[in-house]
């Protein structure tokens, strides 16, 4: 009977979720070479290739990798819940977290799922709202912590977890008639993404018109793919490779947005510290 090493499975899941050996290594607290070696040994154990890789880049999962991923996640969840149940010093309590609806959830979802799996004594509740709404709920004492977007020059009292580079994208089906302003899809005026986009368009100097506004990343992406307008979107949230028919636009670079952790005064400090560290290591 084949026996699968739990640490190799953890590294495989981390690579599958981050699409990066570097970020996966940070998540599992190993060197990149160790993670690569673990992947090779796991593939030897399974007898099949699990990842498409070339020159150190992770391009995606093989059919075998897709089959293994779901089972690996369940094994890790059971393993971590067992370890947590035996750990007298395990974290416990409730943590109410808000995550910006416009941010790149793909980058955080795996981290939060892994945190919840590792700390069975923690009740982690999460909700997605626009950044300004989350900050209002935090200030009202309705949340313990929020992960929100801010302009890099206006971080304020938050701790920067990472930054997201924005890219201008549009569908090749986008129609712009002669003399017509550039149609733009984007986020509300209170959003840091919007601030970066507006600054870049002001530097561009051409005529433009905001034709579609939504606080949700998925909604703006849908507007772009439908050909409604051009939008500045976070690079980490984009499909790899870009779908056929979506192209980067030649406009001034919209720059980066800071993804910031804000915490409520007197909140569950040990829990928040552990969660912040988990996010920083993973991204």
Image (cartoon, rainbow, N blue to C red):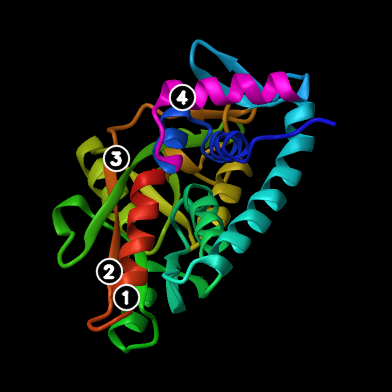
Residue under pointer 2: 262
Give the Cα distance between marks 2 and 3. 24 Å
The residue range painted magenta reads 28-45
Instruction: From the image, state whether disc 1 or disc 4 is nearer to you.
Output: 4
Give neighbour class at mark 3: few <14, some 14-19, many 20+ (Cα, 10 Å).
Answer: many
Whether the magenta-drawn stretch holds residue 44 is answered as: yes
Label 4 sits on a secondary structure element that is: helix
Between 83 and 170, the one lying in front of the other is: 83
Mark 3 vs 1: CB contact within 8 A: no
Mark 2 vs 4: CB contact within 8 A: no
Mark 1 vs 4: CB contact within 8 A: no
Mark 1 vs 2: CB contact within 8 A: yes
Residue 5 at x, y = what percent? 65, 35
Q: Quick one: label 2 or label 4, which is nearer the N terminus?
A: 4
Whether the magenta-drawn stretch holds residue 78 is answered as: no
Residue lying farthest to the right in this orientation: 1
Instruction: From the image, state whether disc 1 or disc 2 is nearer to you.
Output: 2
Label 3 sits on a secondary structure element that is: loop
Residue under pointer 4: 34
Q: Quick one: label 1 or label 4, which is nearer the N terminus?
A: 4
């Amino acid at each position: 009977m084949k026996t699968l090493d739990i640490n190799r499975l953890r590294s495989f899941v981390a690579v599958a979720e981050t699409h990066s050996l570097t970020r996966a290594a940070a998540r599992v607290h190993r060197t990149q070479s160790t993670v690569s070696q673990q992947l090779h040994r796991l593939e030897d154990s399974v007898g099949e290739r699990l990842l498409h890789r070339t020159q150190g880049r992770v391009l995606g999962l093989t059919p075998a990798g897709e089959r293994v991923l779901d089972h690996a996640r369940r094994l890790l969840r059971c393993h971590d819940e067992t370890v947590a149940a035996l750990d007298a010093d395990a974290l416990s309590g409730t943590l109410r977290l808000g995550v910006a609806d416009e941010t790149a959830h793909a980058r955080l979802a795996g981290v939060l799922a892994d945190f919840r799996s590792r700390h069975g004594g923690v009740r982690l509740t999460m909700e997605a709202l626009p950044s300004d709404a989350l900050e209002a709920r935090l200030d009202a004492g309705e949340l313990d912590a929020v992960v929100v977007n801010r302009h890099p020059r206006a971080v304020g009292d938050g701790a920067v977890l990472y930054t997201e580079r924005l890219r201008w994208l549009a569908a090749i089906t986008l129609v712009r008639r002669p003399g017509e302003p550039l149609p733009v899809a984007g986020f509300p005026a209170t959003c840091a993404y919007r601030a970066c986009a507006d600054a870049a368009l002001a530097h561009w100097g051409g005529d433009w018109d905001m034709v579609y506004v939504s606080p949700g990343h998925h909604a703006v992406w849908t507007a772009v793919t439908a050909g409604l307008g051009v939008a500045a979107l976070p690079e980490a949230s984009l499909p790899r490779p870009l779908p056929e028919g979506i192209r980067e636009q030649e406009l001034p670079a919209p720059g980066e947005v800071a993804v910031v952790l804000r915490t409520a005064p007197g909140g569950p400090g040990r829990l928040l510290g552990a969660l912040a560290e988990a996010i920083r290591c993973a991204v």
